[in-house]
Every structure is written in C-alpha cells, then in structure tokens.
Image: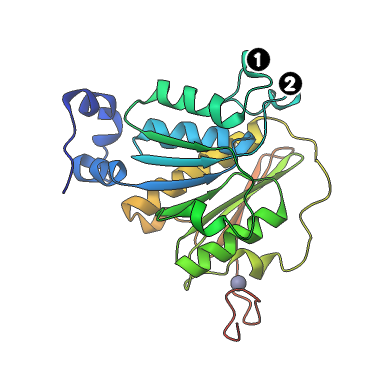
Amino acid sequence: MTPSLSPEEALRYHRQMILPQIGDEGQKILQRSRVFLAGLGGLGSISAYYLAAAGIGQLRAVDRDRVDLGNLNRQLLHFTEDIGKEKTESAKTKLENLNPHCRVEAVCETIHGHNGDTLVGDAHLIVDGTDNLKTRKILNRVSIKKGIPFIFGGVDGLTGMTTTFIPGKTPCFECLFPEGTLDKGPPGVLGPLPGMIGALQALSAINFLLGIKSGLLAGRMLYIDGATMNFRTIQMGKNDRCRVCGADY
Ligand SMILES: [Zn+2]
C-alpha cells in the first residue's frame, strides 16, 4: 500500500517536492525506501543526516565504535557531550530529532563475513561509510550476491572519491581494488572532504531510489582534490577476471 504524506510531511519536504524530479510520487518512493549504512564516522555522519532529512523511510546504520574526542573534527553527528557513547546511540538520537518520520535502526556490531547478509537484510541500497578495505569487500560480496547497489565513498588526506557499483551493470569494488591498496593506516582528514563525499553519496542514493539515471556515478569514479579544488570523473571498466563479479566465479 502506498503511504500518504501528512500535512506536516508535505510542509517538511516542500522545497524538494516542488522539484519536477521528485514531486509527491518521488517523496512517497523515498518514504518507502530502506537504506543500509555501514559506518557512522566522517562519511556516514553526513550521508545519514541528508538521507534522514530527505525522508528516507528506514535507515539501518551499523557501527561498532564509541565516540572519541579525535572524531569530532569531521564526524558531525557526534557532539562533545557524546564522547564515550556508542556512535549508534549518538546517531539515533540526532537523526530522530532531525526527522522523526525516518525509522532509524542503529546496530552496534562489527560487520563480518558471516553477518553481512543478515545486517543488510532487504535494503534497497548499501551506502559505504566505512574506513577499511576488509569491510568494503564484505559489503561488496553482499551487494553482488543480493543484487543491491553499493555506493562507495573514500577519503585520503585532501582527496576523496565516490562511485556507485550496480551489480551486473558496472564494475564492482573488487574489480577496482583486488588487492589491499586502500588501507595505509589512518590518513590525515579535514572534515569537509568526507563531508562532501558523504553528501554526494546521499545524493547518489536519492537519485538511484528516484530512478534519476543521469544522476548516478555508475561506471564512473568522481575524484575530488581539496588541495587544488579539481573535480573530475573517470570511466571505469569491469574486470572480467574479478573474483567476485567475473564470469568464472
Ligand atoms: Zn568485480
């Protein structure tokens, strides 16, 4: 059954609903959408804010960590008073305050190979807010197995990148990162970089859910260089010998 929007919701989302790409129907699509978010750090803080504010119906966010003072230059979901709390608890409070219409399921767990399937469940989308290769590879396998698009984001120093992996249509994470090339220990991070990437991931998610194909970074990686303010996109090809999405596997 298609849910209806209350007068309060119609007012809350008015400025986006007057966009021809969204309208009443688009808003109802967002209301019915379920998004899985891995990580509530610098990327996940911002994507979660925008997804909740836009009226995504259900957001399941997973993070095992507690808020640390050293997180606060970029992880804007968490405040000084939250230091020591579970990030999931801190995030749920903020997001539900921001938009009580968004059902936030906050799960304080580590994502492993054996629980990834269950945690992702029947989400329409996987949004990557993690900071390590291992978890991304687990999420990528779940994405391919279940046919759920995976919106990747990453930052390193003053550079950031994002793309959307669509199973069967684009390269997958493993195609691009077959070996351990991303993890080099904690890089320096300036808040606006994960902020921009997290916002772009939320935009990619909304574009996907609304079927705005021109707004997808499918088969394209967007790179941002904060030191030069250069933004560029690079076309990416599938790896036929990929261990996850290749024909032989
Ligand atoms: Zn692949």
Q: Identify residue type, mark 2.
A: Leu
Would residue 20 be seen by someone viewing this image from the given angle?
no
Side of 189 relative to 46 (left or right): right
- N-terminal of the pair, mark 2 or mark 1, is 2
Using the image, tell me which numbered label, if any, was put on residue 209.
none
Q: Quadrant of ligand 1?
A: bottom right
Side of 131 relative to 235 (left or right): right
Q: Is residue 49 placed above or below 25 in the rendered structure? A: above
Q: What residue is pinned by disc 1?
A: 80
Using the image, tell me which numbered label, if any, was put on residue 69.
2
Side of 173 relative to 227 (left or right): left
Find the residue positioned furthest to the right.
185
Q: How is the image coloured?
A: rainbow
Q: Identify residue type, mark 1.
A: Thr
Decide which of 173, 135 is in the foreground and name it: 135
Find the residue positioned furthest to the bottom.
248
Would residue 11 be seen by someone viewing this image from the given angle?
yes
Q: Position of residue 186 (x, y in %)?
A: 81, 41
Find the residue positioned furthest to the front.
114
Give the image quarter of residue 163.
Answer: bottom right
Residue at the location (25% across, 28% down)?
A: 14
Q: Are marks 2 and 1 in contact (CB under 8 Å)?
A: yes
- Circle 2 packing at 10 Å, graded few (<14), some (14-19), many (20+), is some
Q: How many angstroms separate mark 2 from mark 1 (CA)?
A: 7 Å
Number of marks in the image?
A: 2
Element marked by disc 2: helix
Decide which of 11, 233 is in the foreground and name it: 11
Residue at the location (57% across, 85% down)?
A: 247
Q: Report if the beta carbon of the residue with label 1 is closer than 8 angstroms to ligand 1.
A: no
- Circle 1 packing at 10 Å, graded few (<14), some (14-19), many (20+), is few
Element marked by disc 1: helix
Q: Position of residue 103 (x, y in %)?
A: 37, 35
